[in-house]
Image (tube, helix red, strand yellow):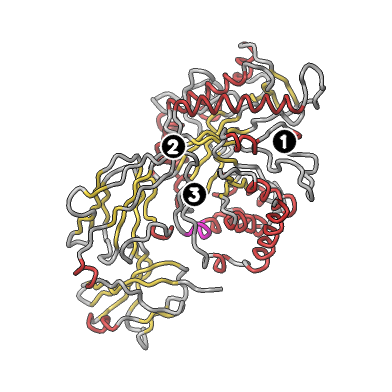
């Protein structure tokens, strides 16, 4: 079975590498409605955030604005999952009762920013405003420099710690480590509405001596030590909030494959991570393997992760930082091919790290925005029953439309979140990602302006495990359906054929709008000839057409889809 899977994957790679040479070829495929699109947001040494220390009310606001700007960029690229480093090196970015403040927040170890500012609470609020999941990224075994405040406090508490040139590390065989790390993760889950716990460096350090085979120091015993820590954290988190996703970031190659070597560095044998076993046991809901490799060091090992996922989620960790010439010699094509193949296999992607994505190294951010042309939902959690409640309209209809083209959506239910859909066809197809208007919306009413009268709406409840309810469709009278422009306007990808009704409007200019009613283009009617409107520079997607006459009166003409084949 494994050989067959690898052969199939290699065929996919060949097709992807040779046929999908540009994004327009790929976007003819159906966009996935469920896909994790993640970014690691690093606070260690303020690598990604924050760059401004929070030492006054003014600088706190500046630090907040830094994060807002980063999240806004993510939102424009339809990123849906943020892995925020909350425990750095035995120090935190939130007021902890267990460990000191990390210096990245104020520039001083152990110093709180004051003024009631809690960076993690602020990040959770801002991510949820944008419909994004936020996972607390926990650096587990590393504890920083041996003279750092966090490391010194651990030594005072009696933890066994070893020092290497790369820093100091907890001894995974120390029985006090598992409950201690579990208490930190438990503290975060109790105090904050995080959507996940992501364990980083949950393994033996690179410089740790090889197994001595004395006093129980064997490879199996080491793997047992790490698994005991994972289990303790899992049990603590799930007891408090069972919907919080457990994940980790293992070494990108699980083990040697029959035809491909891990080059003497893999998760299972070298650093004692049995991450695939954690998936089988249900100790992990997701894996974010750090696959910062190319070619035969990437694709066969991606197949191995997928084949051994036990119906749980794999999110490939992308070496986006290698796009910077100071870090590596990757081309944008190296990265985009990995993204194409991972999507074909139903695998999400996570960029390491934020700066290299948002600074648009080699155009990677521009590509991300196009690659994620529609919103998506993270995959639902396996092995749980839906707890979402189907919404129902407050009055007779889900939508209250007014003469000024504004509309209010209102419904009732007890689900924590709702997904809102919109389409020019009725009923709204809520399995089509292109119809997603808002994800993880936490209210029960929504006001919209400049709503095209031919746009229909639907709402689905969403629980904390990612399960959706059946759709509540807008209540539409048959007369409205017959009078509306439900037929799509015809086009060949270059020219749109204007409907005959345009001649009756005394059109002065044409307006092309996005699905959400945002004006994209205004075109004068004077140069238009032969009832054909040029649309060759529009990207694939759904649009609507509205015309205005010289009296500034508007007339909706209907919708059209641009879908060019390769």
When asked about the image quadrant of residue 159, the answer is top right
Distance from disc 1 to disc 3, alpha carbons, whole Å, reads 30 Å
Bin the neighbour count of mark 2 within 10 Å (Cα to Cα): few under 14, some 14-19, many 20 and up. many
Q: 173 or 450, which lies in front?
A: 173
When asked about the image quadrant of residue 17, the answer is bottom right
Residue 493 lies within the magenta run: no
Query: Which segment did they paint magenta?
Result: 369-373
Which residue is labeled 3 in the image?
A: 79
Given the current orientation, which residue lies at the most extreme bottom position?
A: 530
Q: 38 or 145, which lies in front?
A: 38
What is the count of numbered marks?
Answer: 3
Q: Residue at x 54, y 55 (%)?
A: 368
Residue 64: mark: 2
Q: Is residue 142 above or below residue 355?
A: above
Q: What kind of element bears circle 1?
A: helix
Q: Residue at x 51, y 24 (%)?
A: 236
Which residue is labeled 1 in the image?
A: 268
Q: 185 or 428, which lies in front?
A: 428
Q: Residue at x 26, y 84 (%)?
A: 503
The quadrant in which the C terminus is found is bottom right
Q: Is residue 103 above or below residue 420?
A: above
Expressed as whole percent of the image width and height from the top left, the position of residue 162 reads 72, 20
Mark 1 vs mark 3: in front:
1
Is residue 220 found left or right of 419 in the rendered image? right
Q: 514 or 509, which lies in front?
A: 514
């Amino acid at each position: 079975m494994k050989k067959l899977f690898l052969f199939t994957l290699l065929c996919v790679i060949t097709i992807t590498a040779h046929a999908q040479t540009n994004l327009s070829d790929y976007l003819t495929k159906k966009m996935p409605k469920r896909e994790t699109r993640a970014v690691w947001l690093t606070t260690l040494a303020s690598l990604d955030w924050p760059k401004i220390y929070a030492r006054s009310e003014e600088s706190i606001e500046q630090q907040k604005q830094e994060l807002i700007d980063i999240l806004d960029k993510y939102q424009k690229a339809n990123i849906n999952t943020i892995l925020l480093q909350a425990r750095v090196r035995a120090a935190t970015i939130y007021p902890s009762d267990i460990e000191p403040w990390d210096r990245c927040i104020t520039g001083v170890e152990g110093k709180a920013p004051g003024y009631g500012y809690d960076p993690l609470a602020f990040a959770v609020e801002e991510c949820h405003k944008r419909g994004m999941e936020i996972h607390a990224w926990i650096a587990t075994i590393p504890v920083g420099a041996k003279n750092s405040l966090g490391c010194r406090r651990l030594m005072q508490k009696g933890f066994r710690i070893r020092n290497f040139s790369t820093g100091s590390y907890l001894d995974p065989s120390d029985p006090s480590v598992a409950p201690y790390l579990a208490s930190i993760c438990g503290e975060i889950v109790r105090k904050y509405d995080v959507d996940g716990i992501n364990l980083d460096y949950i393994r033996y350090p690179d410089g740790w001596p090889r197994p001595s085979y004395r006093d129980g120091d064997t490879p199996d015993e080491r793997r047992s030590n790490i698994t005991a820590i994972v289990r303790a954290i899992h049990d603590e988190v799930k007891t408090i909030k069972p919907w919080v996703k457990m994940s980790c970031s293992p070494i990108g190659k699980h083990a040697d494959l029959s035809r491909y070597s891990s080059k003497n560095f893999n998760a299972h044998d070298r650093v004692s991570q049995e991450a695939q076993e954690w998936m089988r046991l249900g100790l992990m809901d997701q894996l974010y393997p750090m696959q910062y490799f190319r070619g035969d060091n990437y694709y066969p090992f991606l197949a191995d992760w997928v084949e051994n996922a036990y119906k749980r989620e794999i999110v490939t960790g992308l070496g986006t930082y290698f796009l910077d010439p100071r870090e590596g010699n990757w081309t944008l094509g190296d990265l985009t091919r990995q993204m194409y193949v991972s999507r074909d296999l139903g695998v999400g992607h996570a960029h390491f790290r934020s700066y290299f994505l948002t600074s648009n190294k080699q155009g990677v951010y521009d590509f991300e925005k196009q690659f994620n042309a529609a919103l998506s939902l993270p995959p639902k959690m396996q092995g749980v029953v839906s707890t979402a409640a189907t919404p129902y309209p407050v009055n007779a209809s889900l939508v209250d439309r007014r003469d000024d083209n504004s509309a209010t959506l209102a419904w009732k239910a007890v689900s924590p979140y709702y997904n809102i859909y919109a389409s020019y066809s009725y009923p709204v197809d809520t399995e089509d990602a292109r119809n997603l208007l808002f994800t993880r919306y936490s209210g029960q009413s929504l006001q919209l302006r400049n709503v095209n009268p031919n746009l229909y709406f639907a709402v689905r409840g969403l629980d904390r495990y990612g399960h959706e309810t059946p759709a509540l469709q807008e209540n539409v009278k048959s007369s409205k359906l017959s009078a509306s422009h439900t037929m799509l306007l015809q086009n060949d990808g270059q020219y749109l054929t204007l409907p005959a009704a345009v001649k009756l409007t005394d059109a002065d200019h044409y307006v092309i709008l996005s699905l959400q009613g945002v004006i994209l283009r205004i075109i004068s009617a004077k140069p238009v000839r032969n009832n054909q409107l040029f649309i060759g520079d529009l990207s694939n997607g759904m649009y609507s057409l509205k015309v205005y006459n010289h009296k500034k009166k508007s007339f909706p003409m209907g919708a059209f889809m641009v879908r060019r084949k390769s």
